Amino acid sequence: MRSPRTTVAAWTLYDFANSAVAAIVFSTVYPRYYAEAVVGNEVGRGDLLWGLIISTTMVAVAVSSPVLGGIADHAGVRKPFFVGFSVVSVTATALLATVGPGMEVWGFAVAVTALVAFEAAFVYYNAYLPRIAPPERLGRVSAVGFAVGYAGSVVAFVVAIPSALAETYWVAFLTTAAQFGLFALPAFVVLPGDARAAIPLGTAMARGVSDTLATLREILVAPERAQMKRFLLAYLVYEDGVNTVVAFAAIFAGKTLGFSFTETLVLFLLVQVTALLGAAAWARPTDRRGPRLVVRTTLVQWTIVTVLAFFVDAKWQFWVVAVLAGTGLGAIQAASRTFMATLIPAGREAQFFGFYSLVGKTGAVMGPLVFGGVSWLLAGNQRGAILVVGLFFVVGFVLLARVRAGGPTARAAAAPAPRGSA
């Protein structure tokens, strides 16, 4: 029997591992490489195709996550699914090294595969949170995971900078895959398997599909899921904005402000450090004051970020905006996951976190298309696009005001009512 500390350590180390993909493939090196070197972005076509990659990824994850979560819950294969999707993502990330200029279709297909598998594995990773952390420490454990993840991003950036200087970007994709595969191993070994007895996979698939529809109806109409429904609606909107800003920040910095590849990597290195600090700073308040307060506070911060980004015309100004964005990034991601964990009934973590992923990824479809489409319609002008994205944070803030949950997790742990009650 492994100690709780060992289990939490292995869980957080996985965030260190997969954050390399988030940092290099989703946020910085590959977006700019694909948009500028593979496609060409003089008139915004690279923006458009990169936005299509992100939207395609999110649609695929949104459609599959709840069903896969239900199958994993019934068949007792949550851990095998977690490991399997991680391995697929590692392999596809390594294959990005084969993408060269003009290889738009191959670059599109490999990136979508890497990111879909990455996001699918993350569903099962998130589902472990309420299993390994007591209710009164959900916020802190969630924040530690993100903080360690941002440390992983820092390492990935440091390793990638020499490749950027030498313009051997394929090396960065191979080292990213290596970091993911190596540091994910402790989670593969230490995290617990499924407690329930397995049933045949075919039966589990049928139940997974039917349970997905039943869970959707439950979220929509059951009184005890009213607060979950309201939270997920708000999350649908504001997570769209977060994902869009992260996905296009490197392209915006390069095209609009003239950042070199190396400057972009250093910029995002700073973002990861400040995100780590933001997640750590808000960890205890998330438990003591509640994730709802933390999310609403950071939504104000994100709105300010998009407005400032519209007006910046010098590199040093964007460095300031990046610090502000970074401190809000870690806080909003950790607090949102904690918020959802407080609303999930025990024993259904994978399925409900599948819906959490569905909502988050569905909410990442429109934003990239909006940014890419507005940029393309304005002949490559990205300032108007980033300002439009800011509306997602404003609407999310308003919707979150309707949620009557997300209070202090320690208080929730002491209350007799089950999690997820209205």
Image (tube, rainbow, N blue to C red):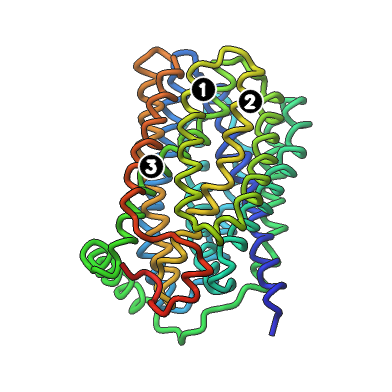
Image quarter where the N terminus lies is bottom right
| Amino acid of disc 3 | Phe
Camera sees residue 277: yes
> Could you say where residue 417 lies in the image, as x and y percent from the top left?
38, 77
Image quarter where the C terminus lies is bottom left
The image's mark for residue 156 is none
Residue 255, picture quadrant: top right
Q: Are marks 2 and 3 in contact (CB under 8 Å)?
A: no
The image's mark for residue 397 is 3
Q: Secondary structure at mark 3?
A: helix
> Separation of disc 1 and disc 2 at Cα?
9 Å
Q: Is residue 400 above or below residue 199?
A: above
The image's mark for residue 320 is 2
Q: Is residue 235 left or right of residue 175?
A: left
Assess disc 1: are there few (<14), some (14-19) or many (≥20) residues with their C-alpha within 10 Å of its C-alpha: some
Q: At 35% from the left edge and 54% from the top edge, which residue is drawn?
A: 232
> Could you say where residue 329 lies in the image, as x and y percent from the top left?
56, 42
Residue sitting nearer the eye, 142 or 98: 142
| Amino acid of disc 2 | Val
Q: Is residue 171 left or right of residue 401?
A: right
- Please tell me which of labels 1 and 3 falls first in the chain: 1
Residue 10, picture quadrant: bottom right
Q: At 57% from the left edge and 58% from the top edge, which residue is drawn?
A: 86
> Separation of disc 1 and disc 3 at Cα?
18 Å
> Separation of disc 2 and disc 3 at Cα?
23 Å
Q: At 36% from the left edge and 24% from the top edge, which residue is drawn?
A: 373
Camera sees residue 209: no
Q: Are marks 1 and 2 in contact (CB under 8 Å)?
A: yes
Q: Secondary structure at mark 1?
A: helix
- Please tell me which of labels 1 and 2 falls first in the chain: 1
Q: Which residue is mark 1?
A: 308
